[in-house]
Image (cartoon, grey):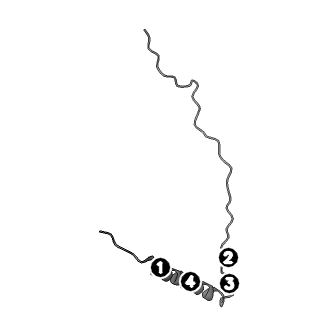
Amino acid sequence: MRIIVPWKPVVIVWGLLSGLVLFGFLGSSVPKGKTPFVPSVTKVQTVVVKPAVASTVPKAKHPHKAPTSGR
């Protein structure tokens, strides 16, 4: 059994709701004096990256080899 969905009303309602959200966001940011789509300068943080430390694990003197059959 198939369920038939009328997509045109769904798309219209979806568009109206997304438009209301967008205009609500713009309408709430303009009275505060903020630019809506620019990141805030106060929230930008610098990240300090430390240089990589050399590994303290000693390297093996001999590479691992598969055991050979002694015939």
Q: Amino acid at mark 3?
A: Lys
Left or right? Give the position of 38 relative to 68: right
Q: Which residue is at 57% across, 23% downward?
A: 62
**Do the CB atoms of the residues marked 3 and 1 lie less than 8 Å apart?**
no
Q: Amino acid at mark 1?
A: Lys
The mark lying in front, picked from 4 and 1, is: 1
Measure the C-alpha gap from mark 3 to mark 1: 36 Å
Check disc 3 and report its element: helix, strand or loop. Answer: loop
Q: Which mark is residue 62?
A: none
The residue tagged 3 is: 34
Residue 8 percent location from the top left of the image: 47, 79
**Do the CB atoms of the residues marked 4 and 2 lie less than 8 Å apart?**
no
The residue tagged 1 is: 8
**Do the CB atoms of the residues marked 4 and 1 lie less than 8 Å apart?**
no
The residue tagged 4 is: 19
- First in sequence: mark 3 vs mark 1: 1
The residue tagged 2 is: 40
Q: Amino acid at mark 4?
A: Gly
Check disc 4 and report its element: helix, strand or loop. Answer: helix
Left or right? Give the position of 32 relative to 20: right
- First in sequence: mark 4 vs mark 1: 1
Measure the C-alpha gap from mark 4 to mark 2: 24 Å
Q: Does residue 21 lie above or below 41 as drawn?
A: below
